Amino acid sequence: MRTSLTVEEALELVLAEARGEPGVEVLPLKEALGRVLAEDLAALVDHPDQDDTAIDGYACRQEDTLGASRESPVRLKVIGESPAGKPFGGRVGPKEAVAVYTGAPIPEGADAVIRVEDTRREGDEVLLFAPASPKDIRPKGDDLRRGQVYLKRGDLLSPGRLGLAAAMGHPRVRVFRRPRVGILTTGDEVVEPGEPLPYGGVYNSNAYSLLGLVWEAGGEPVLLGKVEDEPEKVLARLEGAGRLDLLLTSGGVSMGEYDVVRKVLEERGEVLFWKVKQQPGGPLLLARLGELPVLGLPGNPVSSMVTFFLYGRPFLFRLLQRTEPPYRALKARALTPFRGAPGKKVFRRGVLSFEGELVVRTTGNQSSGVLRSMAQGNALVVIPPDRDVQEGQEVEAIPLTFVL
């Protein structure tokens, strides 16, 4: 068992455990939002499938409109109209025009369009007060070309990508199955929300914070409830977790007499590492129970969320072969001081905003038990070991940007 790893060393070992694939299923588009593509998607059609107009106006021959102005308008005969979905079937000849509407095909013989604002209709004729132009004609395949790949295996199906899949002609898509992630909370003091809170007790916030984080990262959370700090009960719950791709435990991985999860995994599984040189979340543990990867998260609410974000989220992204990174770091100006720690990389909670430049300020109390800081904050401020950040200094911030 390795111990006291750097953040980078720990992340490398966690990602190495994200092996295999979670399986594939086929879903109709209406059920695929937020899922991850399991195959490349190519366009089944051209879009547009012919030259069309980007504006409401009149299609005509550009040469017939040269020199048109307010003082000297050009008069054309209107021979028909072409609304979207009902294209004009004839041909535009000299000194002729067809009324067209956004998205309508350009009639044969026309090579230019003039916007309706630059015209005036007079019976079956139209006066043009400016020359027509081809600039508002969208050529065939301007958006999509048949056979070209526009969405990649590993892409998250966001609203825009879902619409793109539909525009390409796909009624169903192959997506990765959500990896099943078990969430087990330990601690005699933990009770479920709604139950009477005994003296010294705490509500089980970790299970619900992790449930949200797992779902947002692409997993299927499986709540395994809470287990007392007794080795036999912890082992029974771990071994009875069922088919999972990852198991999260919350609490029981520190050095106390009642931190039994680590002891059970050392005896019945294989602990790959324990303790990372970071704050909060130092007592993080990575183990295997048979073939099942286990992330032992600290019990403090902030530590539990931060460690999942930094390690569990990348694990699920790797398993799902996501094309986007699990998080990005930005540079921001500190509007408040942030305290570091000797020998540890520190992740403080901050509020990131744009005020002429990217700036970040503290959420206040940085205790790992102050869960409200994870609700009020929207970024983790990264402080290298052995240094503090003073007001006005540049700092690295990781946005806590969640897409549900």
Image: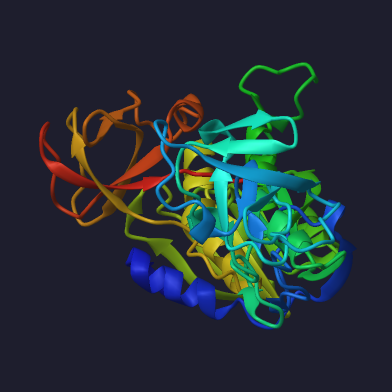
Front-most of residues 374 and 397: 397
Between 392 and 7, the one lying in front of the other is 392
Residue 228, compared with residue 109, is above or below; it is above
Q: Is residue 231 visible?
A: no
Image location (x, y in percent) of residue 401: 49, 44
Instruction: Identify the residue shown where x is 78% and y is 67%.
Output: 244
Camera-side residue of 155 and 168: 168
At horizontal 51% and vertical 34% (from top left) the residue drawn is 118
Residue 25 position by quadrant: bottom right
- Judged left or right of residue 330, residue 106 is right
Residue 26: percent from left, percent from top: 88, 70
The residue that appears at 39% across and 31% down in the rendered structure is 71
Residue 115 is left or right of residue 222, and the answer is left
Image vertical order of residue 22 relative to residue 388, above or below: below
Residue at 35 percent across and 69 percent down: it is 8
Left or right, 4 with respect to 105, comes to left
Q: Nearer the viewer, residue 116 or 325?
A: 116
